[in-house]
Structure formats: C-alpha cells, structure tokens
C-alpha cells in the first residue's frame, strides 16, 4: 500500500489531540457531577430513613421513599448509558454467505487483505443505494473489540462497476484499517454515548413520569430531581459542544483517510465516479417509488424495480447530456452540486462527512491509477441477482394497500408509460428545468404589451444556463432550510442542536438564523425577478419579430389570471390543511372543540374557492361526473365533524376527499396553462419548426 497516502495528516493528529482533550474535560466534569450526586444520594437516603424512623405514618413513609429515590433518580440519569445498547433493526436486510455469493466474498477477502483489517462478522444486502459498516454497540464497546457487519445496497450494486463497488467497500473498511485510526473510532463511540445520555431520554422520562404518577408527594421529588438534572444537562451540554465540534472536524479527516485507503486499494477514479453517480442512482429509485405510488389506484406493481432504476437513471443522464462510460453515466461535479445547496443537517449529531467537492479534490490530488481495471457491471458478481432483486422489490410493495390483486407491469410497459408521463408532465427542454421550480413572469401591468420591444444581448441558452439555475437551486435550498429551522424553533422538529454550513447551533440561535435566511432569500429573489423580467421581454421581442405578438399576449394574460387565481386557491387549501392537521393526531376533547372553530372558519374560504372551480367551464375537463356529484353533496352540507365526544368519520371522509381533489385540480390547471405558454415561447426560438 502507498504509505504516504495513508499516513495520518497533521490535521488529523491535531483534531485527534483536541478530541482527546475534550473527552478528558468532559470526563472531569462528569466525575465531579457524579461525586456530587453520590453525596446528594447519601444525604437523601439518610434523611429519608430518619424521617421514616422518627415520624411513623403513611405520609412520612411515602415522603421518605420519595426522598431516598430522589438521589437515585439523579444518579441513574448519569449512569443510564452504561445499560443502553444500540442495535440495528435487521428485518429489511438479507444475510448472504460465502456459499451463496462467492464472488462478493472473494472481493471482500481481497479488500480485507489489502486494507489490513478484519473480515466482517456478517454481510447483508439491502435495497438501498448505499453501503455501510455497523455493529451493535453499548458502553463496553469502547473497551472490548467488536466485529463489524457490512451492508451492501442492491441499488448500489446495480448502478456501479465492479471497481467502483470495490472502492466503496474499501472506503468503508478504511475506517478501521490502521492503529492510528483507532482513536477516531474511540472518539466516535464516546461522542455517541454522550449524545445519547444528553438527548435520548425518552425512556428515562417515561419511567420518571410513571413514578411521579404514583403519588402527588413523590411527584414533588421527581420535579426537584428534574430541575437538578436540567442544570447538570446545561453544564454537560456546554462541555459536549466542545467535544462535538472537535469530533466533527476529526470525522472529516477520518473520511479523507478512508478515501485514501480506497484510492490506494483500487484507484482514485472508481471512487470519484461512484460518489458522483450515487445521488443520481438514488434519485432514480425515488422517482420509481413515486411512480408506483401513483399507480396504487390502478393496482399496478413491478416484479423487479432494479432494471427500471437503470432505465430512469440513463434517461435522466441523457436528458442532462451526461456522457456514458462502461455502460453508466459519468456525473460531473457541476451536475452533482446543482441539487446539493442545502447547508443544514441535524439527523446525526455525532458524525459528519466533508463536502463531496473536497473529497473529490483530494482524490484527484492523489491521482492513483487503476492497476487492473475491472469495469464489468457489479451486479454480474451476484448469484441469482434477479431472485434477490425480486425479493427486495416485494419488500418495497408489501405495505401498500390495493383494492384488488395488483397486476405486474413489464419493463417495456413501464418505459412507455414513464416516457409518456414525463412528456405530459414536463416543460420544453430549452428551459433547462428552470420553470420546474419557478413560474413565468406575470407581474406586468396592462400596458406592458404597448411598450416598444428591445433586442436582448442574451440568447435562450444564456438565460437558462447553469449559473442562473444555481441561483434558483440556492433559493430553494434557503427556503427549505428556513422551514426546517422554523420547525426546530417551534419544536415541531424536536432537536436540541443542528449544523448549518459546518457550524453547530442550538435552539437559542434559531431566531437569528431565521432572520439571516430571510435576508438571503430576499437577495436571491431580487436576482431572479430581474432575470424573469428579461426573459419576458426576450420572448415578447421574438413574438413581435415572428408576428405572433397577439398570441403571446393572450397566453401571457391568461397565465397571469390563472397564476393569481392559483395563489388564492393555494392559500385557501393550505390554510384548511393546517387547520385540520390535528385530526391526524391524538387530541383532547377540549382541544378538538377549540380547533374545530378554526376549521369551520377556514372551510368557508375553501368552499368559496371549490364552488368557483366546480361552476367554471375552464375546469370542466378536469372534473369527472362522479367527482362533481360528490363535491356537490359536500358543498350543500354544513358538516360538524365532531360531536358527542366523537368524530363523524363519514363527514371527515367527505372533507378530505374534497380537499385532495381540489388540490389536485388547481395544480393540474395551473400546470396546463403554464405549459401552454412555455411551449408557445419555446417555438418562438425556432420559428421554422413551429
């Protein structure tokens, strides 16, 4: 192996040293708190026993027990992590053996030998587009070696070459390849334990609530212990933030090291190619899931979705003009970053990956060539791959409910229907996906078409190039991040900390972050509004040049009207949807009655909008006779939805049918009018074809 590439960097050594220092600081703080708690427990036990000895009554007995338990509750909070075990649910996994899959195990043997690590305890397949190493862990895992298990996603095997798969697996084992990396694994495990102790307290809270419910006297001591534990948590959280930040930086270095291991084992290029393609492969699976979700009413399923994954992936690649090599799309870093603008993460507070750009840069800097290329599709390594694929496909569909026995769709039928749907539900290619996320400019006034037209210095390709699309994707990411942080602030998302742009923030930082994001969103919107105005004027100029200005004006005004209607309709729908959200959760009778007042208020606005589309001929083609009858029945009733402490299920069923139908119809109407305008505009760029 290339020892220079695998030698721990100075930055790794520095981050490892800081992490160890942070652990020592945390342990010192923790020991002080434990000593304090032991003393408190001893005192509370002494006072509790004396109370029961000197004043003999049922009340003092309960108070004595509460006083004794008071100290032990605090002590248990501090040591409960010793008893906690983290075990991965394996119900969705398929274990494979050397006898089952000799080629896969041969590949793992070679990697283990080259990487100088241990063979995994067990090897599993999943339906995911990923690979990972895991082990069941607890407190004692820090002191006793634990053999790791390997998961290989079938969706990953299906979309990589053999070299790319080997590189990904070498990366996973690279984390455990050298003694110098052991400190990183130790810090990881310690960090995870501390995080669980501070933030994963649901079972502990449940136990203490149960104890408090046993007696109002005991609940006093539970309340006091909660206050003391809360103060201890505040102290430990401050120290933990130092540890967490150190580990976040250390984990980056561990990822870079694992990448270097993969590059030395296989070569730089296979890992780069697989990293960049993984998102496209995963997105293809999501598209297939959404496709079959829409087919539930038609009772259509697939026997094997994985050939469809390749079909969709290749379709997306061709549409985005990506080159192919060894039968697979070659994704550029520019295309990869097009959809990766979000800067927030909070799902895993004790692990962090560096940006893909930086990983690829370092892999390119290593520049290690592939010695013996093996560019066959990785799925050819599997024995009975079709049987395995069908098993995972059946797993995907097992929870869907169909009104009758579903029929199996052939690959050719899927391809024809998928392409037809895509054509029906997409805008012309010349817009490069810009209008998938943004509406045409419609803020013009009535005199806009009377103004003189001016030739633009830009052409349609420059309007919708990757630079302008990048601004659009950044805006969408900012809006998504704002919604997430707003939900964190209101505790709809129940997390204590989150990462934004590589830095850690707490609940107290949410309001400042919200103001910052709103300001950034405003800036991006200003940029895009200027672009939208230029695009509008560009097509208005082309329409006049082609003597079709009257048609362009008519379609633009029509879209302006529909877009404004859609805004009102969308607000009416979302306001009622928000008002009825409580119906999907458990709520007290008093709360239901209070919430129902808001529902009835929002329903009045919704019914006005619904009645308007039912009576509008422009929507006639989108509303079937059966739906029209059901909607008319809903509109003529003034449902109560709740009474005598019970929901009226049939009334609620009618309400949600009306809401879902309304939502679908207004989106479809808006889409069709928008597409009509955009298709006409696209033809203006090539009047010969029109």
Image (cartoon, rainbow, N blue to C red):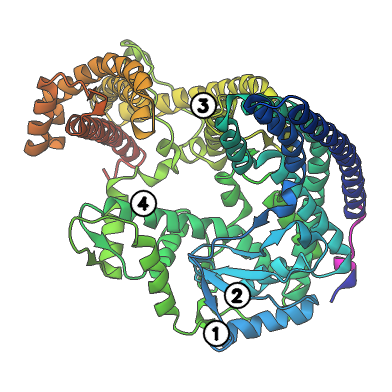
Q: Are marks 1 and 2 in contact (CB under 8 Å)?
A: yes
Residue at image x 68%, y 75%? 120
Q: Which mark is residue 123?
A: 2
- Per the image, the residue denoted by label 1 is 101
Dot 3 or dot 4, earlier in sequence: 4
Q: Of the residues under marks 1 and 4, which one precedes in the sequence? A: 1
Give the x, y percent position of residue 310. 43, 66
- Front residue of 565 and 320: 565
In this view of the protein, which residue sits in the foreground, 124 or 539? 124
Nearer the observer, 352 or 479: 352
Residue 528, labelled with which disc?
A: 3
Density class for disc 3 (Cα within 10 Å; few <14, some 14-19, many ≥20) is some
Q: Earlier in the sequence, mark 3 or mark 2?
A: 2
Label placed on residue 290? 4
Q: CA distance from mark 1 to mark 2?
A: 10 Å
Instruction: For marks 1 and 4, give the one nearer the viewer.
Output: 1
Q: Is residue 288 visible?
A: yes
Are the residues flagged by discs 3 and 2 in contact, CB closer than 8 Å? no
Q: Position of residue 266 (x, y in %)?
A: 72, 75
Q: Position of residue 350 (x, y in %)?
A: 72, 47
SS of the residue under disc 1? loop
Q: Is residue 22 left or right of residue 426?
A: right
Q: Residue shown at 65%/23% (left/top)?
A: 220
The magenta stretch spans which residues?
A: 4-10
């Amino acid at each position: 192996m290339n020892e220079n590439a695998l030698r721990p960097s100075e930055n790794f050594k520095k981050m490892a040293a800081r992490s160890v220092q942070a652990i020592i600081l945390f342990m010192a703080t923790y020991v002080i708190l434990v000593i304090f708690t032991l003393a408190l427990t001893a005192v509370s036990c002494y006072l509790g026993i004396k109370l029961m000895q000197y004043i003999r009554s049922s009340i003092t007995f309960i108070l004595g027990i509460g006083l004794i338990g008071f100290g032990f509750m605090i002590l248990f909070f501090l040591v409960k992590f010793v008893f906690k075990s983290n075990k991965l649910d394996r119900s969705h996994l398929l274990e494979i053996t050397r006898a089952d899959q000799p080629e896969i195990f041969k590949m793992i043997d070679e990697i283990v030998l080259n990487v100088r690590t241990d063979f995994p305890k067990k090897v599993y397949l999943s339906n995911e587009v990923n690979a990972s190493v895991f082990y069941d862990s607890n407190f004692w895992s820090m002191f006793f070696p634990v053999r790791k298990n390997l998961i290989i996603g079938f969706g990953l095997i299906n979309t990589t070459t053999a070299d790319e798969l080997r590189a990904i697996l070498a990366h996973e084992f690279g984390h455990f390849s050298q003694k110098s990396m052991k400190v990183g694994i130790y810090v990881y495990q310690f960090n995870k334990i501390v995080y669980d102790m501070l933030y994963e307290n649901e079972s502990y809270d449940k136990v203490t609530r149960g104890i408090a419910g046993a007696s109002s006297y005991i609940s006093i001591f539970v309340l006091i212990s909660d206050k003391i534990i809360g103060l201890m948590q505040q102290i430990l959280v401050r120290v933990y933030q130092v540890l967490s930040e150190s580990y976040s930086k250390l984990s980056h270095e561990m990822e870079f090291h694992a990448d270097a291991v993969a590059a030395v084992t296989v070569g730089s290029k296979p890992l780069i190619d697989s990293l960049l393609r993984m998102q496209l492969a995963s997105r293809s699976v999501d598209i297939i899931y959404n496709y079959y979700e829409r087919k539930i009413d038609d009772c259509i399923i697939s026997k094997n979705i994985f050939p469809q994954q390749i079909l969709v992936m290749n379709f997306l690649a061709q549409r985005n003009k990506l080159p192919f090599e060894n039968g697979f799309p070659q994704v550029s870093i520019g295309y990869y970053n097009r959809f990766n603008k979000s800067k927030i993460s909070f799902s895993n507070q004790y692990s962090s990956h560096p940006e893909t750009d930086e990983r690829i840069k370092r892999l390119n800097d290593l520049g290690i060539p592939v010695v013996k290329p093996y560019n066959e599709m990785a799925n050819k390594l599997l024995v009975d791959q079709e049987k395995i694929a069908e098993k995972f496909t059946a797993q995907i569909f097992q929870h869907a409910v169909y009104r009758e026995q579903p029929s199996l769709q052939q690959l050719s039928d899927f391809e024809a229907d998928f392409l037809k749907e895509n054509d029906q539900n997409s805008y012309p290619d010349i817009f490069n996906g810009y209008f998938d996320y943004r509406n045409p400019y419609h803020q013009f006034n009535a005199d806009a078409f009377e103004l003189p037209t001016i030739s633009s210095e830009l052409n349609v390709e420059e309007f919708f190039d990757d630079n302008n699309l990048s601004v659009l994707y950044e805006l969408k990411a900012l809006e998504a991040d704002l919604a997430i942080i707003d939900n964190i602030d209101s505790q709809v998302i129940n997390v204590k900390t989150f990462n934004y742009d590589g830095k850690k923030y707490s609940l107290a930082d949410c309001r400042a972050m919200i103001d910052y994001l709103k300001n950034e969103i405003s800036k991006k919107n200003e940029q895009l509004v200027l672009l939208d105005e230029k695009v509008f004027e560009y097509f208005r100029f082309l329409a006049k040049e082609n003597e079709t200005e009257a048609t362009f004006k008519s379609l633009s005004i029509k879209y302006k009207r529909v877009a404004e209607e859609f805004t009102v309709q969308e607000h009416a729908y979302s306001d009622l949807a928000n008002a009825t959200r409580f119906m999907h959760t458990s709520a007290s009778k008093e709360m239901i009655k209070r919430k129902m007042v808001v529902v009835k208020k929002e329903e009045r606005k919704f019914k006005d909008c619904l009645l308007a589309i039912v009576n509008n001929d422009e929507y006639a083609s989108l509303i079937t006779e059966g739906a029209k009858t059901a909607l008319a029945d809903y509109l003529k009733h003034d449902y109560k939805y709740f009474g005598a402490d019970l929901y009226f299920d049939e009334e609620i069923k009618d309400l949600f049918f009306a809401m879902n139908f309304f939502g679908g119809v207004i989106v479809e109407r808006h889409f069709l009018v928008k597409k009509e305008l955009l298709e006409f505009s696209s033809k203006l760029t090539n009047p010969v074809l029109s």
